[in-house]
Every structure is written in C-alpha cells, then in structure tokens.
Amino acid sequence: MVEARIFRAYDIRGVYAKDLTEEVAELIGLAYGTMLGNKGLTVVGRDVRIGGDVLARGMARGLSRAGCDVLELGIVTTPMLYFSAMHFEADGGVQVTASHNPPEWNGFKLVKPGGATLSAGAGMEELKDRVLNRRFREADKRGEIRKVDTIKPYIDFITSKFSFDRKPKIAFDYSNGAVAVVMPKIVERLGLESAAINETPDGRFPGHLPEPTEETLKDLQRLVLDSGADFGAGFDGDGDRVVFVDDRGRIIPGDITLAIYVKHLDRRGKVVFDVSSSSALKEVILEKGCEPVEMRVGRAFILNAVRELNAVIGGEKSNHFYFPEIWGFDDAVYATLRMAEIIARSGKKLSRLVEEVPSYPSIPIRTFECPDELKGRVVEQIAEHYRRLGLKVNTIDGVKAYFDDGWVLVRQSNTMPQVKMTAEAKTENRLREIVSEAENLIMETIKKLRERG
C-alpha cells in the first residue's frame, strides 16, 4: 500500500523500509514512465542514504517496465543528476534522496525534460493519482537499463569554467554526504588548498544531520579559524545547498551571499530572489544597475523565473543559488567555486565582502503549528488585517506587509502543518515590536479559526 502523505509539494519523502520500499519505488517509476509516454531516456541517481541502492533499483525497474531506457548514475549529488539530464539529453530523471532529512528518511526528486522539477502544479498531482489509483500503462517491450559514468564529464564541465591565479584555501564540511564523492577531485584538479571534516560518504551521517545549520556548522566554524582558511563551505546531504562561513568564523545568510554574487557580476540584468530575502539584497541589486524580481519560495518557481526572464542569477535565503551558465541549476559545488573565484579576483577577505553589504536586524524563520486545512485561511485573514491598516501588501507567497521601517512575512508551509513567519526592521527595537505584534496576530487567528471549526 502506498501512503498518500509521501507526495509533497516538491518531492516524495518517507521513512525507508516503512513508507518507501523497492516495490513502492517500482510503482512510482512505472507511473512516471507512463507520464513520459512509455518511451524515452531517463537518468536515475542516488545520494549516500541507507536504502538508496534498493530504491534506485526499484525505480529503474519501474521506468523500464514503462518502456523507458534508464541510465544508472550511482552515487551522485542532486545537481549532478540535473547535469546528467542535460549531458545525456534525457527525457526525465529521478534522484533518490531526502536532502537534509534524518538518516532513516529517503525519497525521490523527479526531473522533467530540461531539468525542471516535477512539483505541485507541475505534474506531482498527476503522479500521485497514477500511483494511488494504479493508472499505469506497461510497455510491450521493456526499456534497457545500463550503468554510465557521469562523474568524469561533470568534473570536466565544472572545472572548465574556472581558473585561479591566486588559490584560496577552503574549509569543507561535507556532512558525510554526496558532495564528498566529487568535490575533492575538483579541488585537486583546480589545485586549490583545502581542509575538510566529515569527508567520508556515509548514509548514517555520523558527523551530524546532513543540514547546514547554526548548530551543525560549529565544527566548520572552528576548522576555518584553526586552519586559517579563506572561507568555509558546509553542504547538505544531496549537494544542492551550501552555507558559507567567513574567515572570522561567521555564518553568512543566503540572501547576503546572493548580494555578494550580485556585486561581482560581470553583466547586468534581472536578479531573481525569494520574498523572505533582506531589503539589503534589493538595495545591492539596484546599486549594481540590475533589476530585482521577487518570487515565491521554492526551486520550481526560482528556476523557472531565472530561465524565462533570462536572469543573470537567482537565489533563495535557504542557500539555493541558481546560475544561468549551468542551465539555471542550483549546484552547491559550482556556488562554492564561484565564491572562491570572487575572493581570489577581488583580493578581499569574505568578511570584508560581507561588510560591504548593508545589514538590518532580522529573525530566523519561526513556525506555528496549524492544521493543513486552516493554513490558507490564516494567511488570508492576516493579509486582510494588514490591508486594513493601510500597509502595502505583497501576496505572491503568503503575505508580506511593508512598514516604513521594516517588513513581516507570513506564509504557509508547503510540506508541514505549519504557518511560518520572519521579519526585518531598521532597528532592533522596531524588529521586536513587529515580531511581537505578528506573533500575537498569528496565534490569535489560528485560535479563532480552530474554535470555529
């Protein structure tokens, strides 16, 4: 039996051997192959998670039953799966991964032709319906399954885009994830100096959970200081996100990292960013002579916007960065080398580059438990509240209300029964006021709607 809850906004996730088994993987592969028209070439990769080999095998078999030819990539990062879809001119692809989830989890990221994500509103509903209702179409002839090497062509592709006269030293925290399979080879090819922790790929993630957070990055911060590195790079489990640590050991937020990229662009154009980003980013974009484009949170939206608008770069506060020179994909390896290039060419320390970006007090995202069926109504009522106050309101993703001296963003989680809130202001005192008012408003709105049923 396949549980409906494993189908999420951007991917499929569940606990391995409970929600996700080889048989479930095969059914999903058969359904996706049916959606692809029972023909074509697909690529299947996996990260280092436990059970990844089993699930990749089931996925390949399901796609083959649907008539699709399958190229098995083995252990790769998710961006390497995207690269492979383009390199091998595939009609679709699947990465077996649960990104930053705990070790017992696994899942699937499905890729459409061109490397765009299968997501809510873009194919996920059809896939879910086909799997749950067994609406498959098995081909008369099974597709061929064969193993291919994508590591060498990926390394050749990435390294061809960089050369360093001055070679910065980088401290890496691989989080025992998939980036450890390829980044050391790239570092060696480019002749960069490095120091590393948690460099052994291990799906149990013995170093720490495979998500770069304030807590898990503590060892990387120490490594940067102890090794005298120019900067540090902490990766998530599947290699599509990287969080940077500057030479003073400070963690750099994703929107500030994007601002640094923007300041060092060699051409002007549209810059795509998500609604939770700091006002400082917009200021930098305008100062650079570029055009700011605010979008909904999520890869599906940012990637599409970067491509459709021919943007010069895109990014999210969550540390996904999108580069048009690699088809708009978010690739933590490429993002790290771009940062190394900026530091090498500018001759400035990362701490100095950070200080050149305006800084405003803000809070990390806060979550409020809220039943799924109430999330949309909560956000709508909060938007109406701010409109009644005469504030400018942006509803592209939840509600973002603008004050003269700050803003607050309230949006529903795409994956959890939660409402999320973040805020920014010109001063700490004003930030506390905005946050306190917003928290009370959110909790009161949830309470009232619960009572009404």
Image (spheres, rainbow, N blue to C red):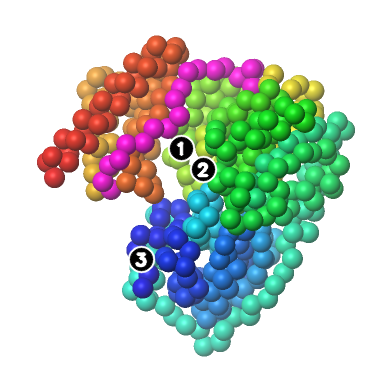
Q: Judge from the rendering whether residue 186 lies leftward or rightward of residue 406; answer left or right.
A: right
- Report if residue 367 lies within the magenta region: yes
Decide: is 367 above or below 62. above
Q: Judge from the rendering whether residue 363 lies leftward or rightward of residue 61; answer left or right.
A: left
Nearer the viewer's eye, disc 3 or disc 1? 3
The residue furthest bottom is 140
Q: Could you give the CA–CA distance between mark 2 and mark 3, rounded to whole angstroms?
A: 29 Å
Q: Which residue: 36% across, 36% down? A: 367
**Magenta stretch in the rendered image:** 354-372
The residue furthest front is 206
Query: In this figure, which residue is indicated by the disc labeled 3?
Result: 3
Q: Which residue: 60% across, 35% down? A: 217
Where in the figure is residue 234, as x and y percent of width and height? 64, 39
Query: In this figure, which residue is indicated by the disc labeled 2?
Result: 302
Q: Which residue: 55% across, 77% down? A: 61
Q: Which mark is residue 9?
A: none
Disc 2 + disc 1, Cβ < 8 Å:
yes
Decide: is 67 above or below 352. below
Q: Secondary structure at mark 1?
A: strand
Query: In this figure, which residue is indicated by the disc labeled 1?
Result: 295
Quarter holding residue 161 = top right
Where in the figure is residue 68, as x and y percent of width and height? 57, 76
